[in-house]
Amino acid sequence: MQEKRYYTIFDAPQNYPSQADFYAQGESPRILSFFLDFLQERADELSEVYLSLHLYNNIYLHEALKALAQRSVKIHLVTIPIEGYATGQARIIHDLVSGEAANPVAQSSYSLARPIFGEFYKRPIGFFDLYLFPHLSIRDAAAMPFVRGEHPYSLQLKSILLLYKNGGGAVGLSSCNLAVRAKLQEENLIFVENDWSLLKTSLRFFQQLLEHAIHIRDFDFKKRYTHLDMQVQAFSQQEYAFFTAPFYKNSSVQAESFLVANAKKATRRIYLVAPHISSYEYTVNGQFHSEYEAEDIEHYGFLRTVLEQAGAGVEVRCISQSFLGKEPAFPTPINAPAFQAFYEILKATSNTHYAINARLNSRYLIIDDTVIVTTCNFTPEQFIYLDQVDIPSFSAAPEASYRGIFAELGQFLKITDATTVEAYVKNFEALWERPATVVVKS
């Protein structure tokens, strides 16, 4: 049996000549380079690559995967339909190597993705299959869910599975899509190689994801997939490799329970890093779940446990990119009421610290000597699972309706490897000391 190995890399806007530019190498050129090198070094060993990306429009990544496919490595790529790629706010894309414009015409996320999608649709690539996952995460009739480029697709996870010819492989989790026309942010990527249980769990997830996804040749681009039936499975997952998905019954709720159980074990520190942190005392519509009463159901939320631990003497430090208030000006948190309730208690609790960095995109949780790396925000939306959402019409679109499951796709990796945990602790400390980071509660 081969030795288990861990690989971790972090990236930051300060690593680039201009933090305001958009690069042809994507939103994290350093992570892209690391990933492509990782693939190239194992090219002779690879048998299959499974990859889930919310957005896929990076030509450098595309060409690298095509090169592997030409060597008979089977590539399975899952992304959202092209309707979810924004067409507005086109920008000039710069080449990081030359410093010049990669194209004289401003590009949008959509215009960059279109030729790549077209290649799959018109000229199929041998050993390379593109699948689209059109599931929408909708639970509110007041939402505006059908604006082009702003569809609330549930496929948010950036997950990688590499299988080797010898039976080994690697599981990867990234905070970024490596997408082009996305701003530079604080990012991270982790690979765990030759962990057999983790490989088995991840392969099961990807196989089930592909069962619910639609191959691009079978996808109806004129159809709105607003009434999508799914075969839901209920089973227990290992907490070291946890996935949330609409086809995993109550997995979102179980994920929050997993975080609560781990937070309760903290004796020294809990450090939270995510663009949005607001999973605190929220309600869900019970009529949209087959096992709930038809009323609003109250959830304490993961952050309540975190604050209780602070009250017991555990040091709690949070970094997000969002905040409520005019000064400083930062993005509004997802689920602002829940955030406001959380922050009011946090301010009144000792052992708590809160900072904001508008460029933050990494997502992880450090509890004592364990790190939980995830693709998810710590928000109510991430931890809600509703299996019978039925909205006959929307306030902003009376002619539209929706029926389906509310749940987002996400991944959690629980790591106790001392070197990896220390790498994330160092990254957290570096984030806290960044010039762009504003400490609002110390």
Image (cartoon, helix red, strand yellow):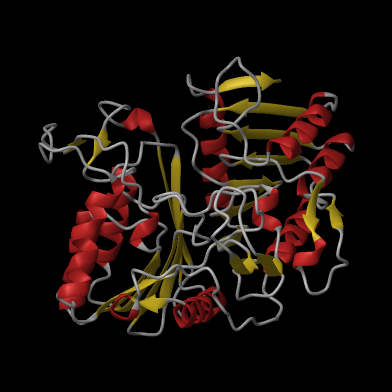
Residue nearest the viewer, comparing 178 with 196:
178
In the displayed structure, 201 sits above or below 135; it is: below
Could you tell me which residue is drawn at 36 percent across and 36 percent down? 184
Q: Quadrant of residue 219?
A: bottom left
In the displayed structure, 307 sits above or below 290; it is: above
Residue nearest the viewer, comparing 200 with 423:
200
The spot of residue 231 in percent (x, y) is 60, 84
In the displayed structure, 324 sits above or below 77; it is: above
Q: Quadrant of residue 191?
A: bottom left
Residue nearest the viewer, comparing 74 with 225:
225
Residue lying at the far top in this picture: please name it: 327
Please indicate whether residue 284 sits to the left or right of residue 390 in the image: right
Task: Count the labels in the image.
Answer: 0
Residue 244 appears in the picture as rendered: no
Please indicate whether residue 333 sits to the left or right of residue 296 in the image: left
The spot of residue 124 in percent (x, y) is 18, 78
The spot of residue 61 in percent (x, y) is 24, 58
The spot of residue 294 in percent (x, y) is 86, 65
Please indicate whether residue 86 sits to the left or right of residue 236 in the image: left
Could you tell me which residue is drawn at 67 percent across and 74 percent down? 237
Quarter of the picture holding the C terminus: top right
Residue nearest the viewer, comparing 94 with 46:
94
Could you tell me which residue is drawn at 54 percent across and 44 percent down? 424
Residue 19 appears in the picture as rendered: yes
In the displayed structure, 195 sits above or below 396; it is: below
Please indicate whether residue 329 sits to the left or right of residue 3 in the image: right
Residue lying at the far front in this picture: please name it: 399
